[in-house]
Every structure is written in C-alpha cells, then in structure tokens.
Image (tube, grey):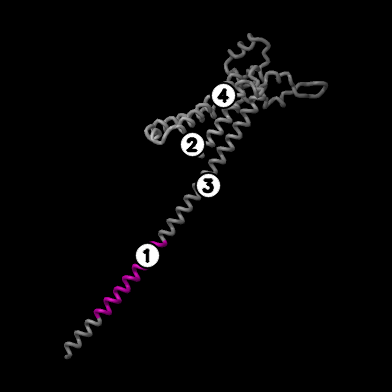
C-alpha cells in the first residue's frame, strides 16, 4: 500500500521520467546533435568548423563541452526518477511485516535517494545557470550584434551551435521545481506555526486551569479553617458551660 504523499511523489517521478526519457530519445526535439563548446570569457559558442578545431578548443584551459554537460544532466535525471519509481513500487508491494523487518534499510535507501536527487538538481542549477550554460542556451544571443548598413543587428551566425530547446527545458524545470519547493516549505512553516500556536493555546488553557484549581484549593482551605474554627469555638463554649455548672 502506497500512502497519499508517496503517490504524489510517484506521479511526479513518472512524469519527469517520461519527459527526461523523451528528451534522451530526442522525441521532444532536443538538440543533442548540436555540439556547443565555449569558455568563461566568450558570450557566444565557439564557431568550430571541423573536429580538429573542436578538439583543439576543448584542449584549452577553461573550455567546456556544454552539450556533454546537458546530456549528463538529462541522463542523470532519467536514472534518478526511475530509481524513485522502482523504490516506491517495491515499498508499496511489501507487507507491513517486511517493511518493519527492513526498516533501517528503507531509511538508508530513502536517504540515498534524497541525496541523489539533491545532487542531480544541484548539478542542473550549476550547469544551466553557469556562464557557459547560459551562453549555449542562448541567453546572451540577443546581445551578440554585427554591423550592417550603418546599423547593428543580431548576429545569427552562432544560432546553429545553440542548445535552445534543452536550455529552455532545464530552465523552466528548475524554476518550477524551486517554486514548488518554496511553496512546500511555506506550507510546512505555516502548518508548523499553526501547530505551535494551538499547542501554546492549549498550554495557556492548562495553566489557567491550574491557577483556577489553585484558587479552589485556597477556598477549600479557607472553608476548612472556618469549619475547624467553628468546631473549636463550639467545643470551647461547651467546656465553659460545663465548668460553670
């Protein structure tokens, strides 16, 4: 049996596995056939014309094969989501007795999966929003100009090297993920504050009841003292009556 929260995670993992798989298979029009290379100083892809120029540029310090990085992120995302799907289905198919027997193992696997997802998402953010990732995604393409007839127009000679589709996918995926995580954290924070507030109100009510009980104890002691004083007075009056007789 799979809980409601795990069902939501399973559904998201299936959706992302399908999307990553379609990108991996180039069904979504992903641009894996394009090889984009650049470095930290260029604001456009390096315009190589043959394999020799490609290899020579990559041999320079600071040069990056952004296509290989993006491909690694897509493959890593596919594998991580498939692992999550397999883990949740396996956990849901097991009996409660088996889950209890291997509880520690499940905790370790869950921690490993969380670490894997965090590493994959961290690599995605690092590769996509680094300078080289932005260059090959076309984030700076509108600023690359060339002079034409006493005016400047956008230089589209680098467009064939850009990874626009993959870059856009990684961009929107990361933004949506960050928004969802922020909303989840806000929800957890709000629920936590409400829980703490309700607990505080309950504590205050218990303290108020305690002081009320303390007031009632003082009233009881007062009534008891009055009763004892009354009994003592009656006893004293009786003794005085006997002595007078």
Residue at image mark 4? 73
Mark 2 against mark 1, which lies toward the viewer? 2
Task: Measure the C-alpha gap from mark 3 to mark 1.
Answer: 34 Å
Q: Report the disc number at residue 2.
A: 2
Q: Report the disc number at residue 213.
A: 1
Q: Quick one: SS at disc 1?
A: helix
Residue at image mark 3? 190
**Magenta segment:** 208-232
The percent coordinates of residue 102 (x first, y second) are 38, 32
Task: Measure the C-alpha gap from mark 2 to mark 1.
Answer: 48 Å
**Number of marks drawn:** 4
Which residue is at 36% across, 65% downward? 214
Task: Measure the C-alpha gap from mark 2 to mark 3.
Answer: 26 Å
Task: Tell whether position 228 is magenta.
Answer: yes
- Mark 2 / mark 4, whichever is N-terminal: 2
- Mark 4 / mark 3, whichever is N-terminal: 4
């Amino acid at each position: 049996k799979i809980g409601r929260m795990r069902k939501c995670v399973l559904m998201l993992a299936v959706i992302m596995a399908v999307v990553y798989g379609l990108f991996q298979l180039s069904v979504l029009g992903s641009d894996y056939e394009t090889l984009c290379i650049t470095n930290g100083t260029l604001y456009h892809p390096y315009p190589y014309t043959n394999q020799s120029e490609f290899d020579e540029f990559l041999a320079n310090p600071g040069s990056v094969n952004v296509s290989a990085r993006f491909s690694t992120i897509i493959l890593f995302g596919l594998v991580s989501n498939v692992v999550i799907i397999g883990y949740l289905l396996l956990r849901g198919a097991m009996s409660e007795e088996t889950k209890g027997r291997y509880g520690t193992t499940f905790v370790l696997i869950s921690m490993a999966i969380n670490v894997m997802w965090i590493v994959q998402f961290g690599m995605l953010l690092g590769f996509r929003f680094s300078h080289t990732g932005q260059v090959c995604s076309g984030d700076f393409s509108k600023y690359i100009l060339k002079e034409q007839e006493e005016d400047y127009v956008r230089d589209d000679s680098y467009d064939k090297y850009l990874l626009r589709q993959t870059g856009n996918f990684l961009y929107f995926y990361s933004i949506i993920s960050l928004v969802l995580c922020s909303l989840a954290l806000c929800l957890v924070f709000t629920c936590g504050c409400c829980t703490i507030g309700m607990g505080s109100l309950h504590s205050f009510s218990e303290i108020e009841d305690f002081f009320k009980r303390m007031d009632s104890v003082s009233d009881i002691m007062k009534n008891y003292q009055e009763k004892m004083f009354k009994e003592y007075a009656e006893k004293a009056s009786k003794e005085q009556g006997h002595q007078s007789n």
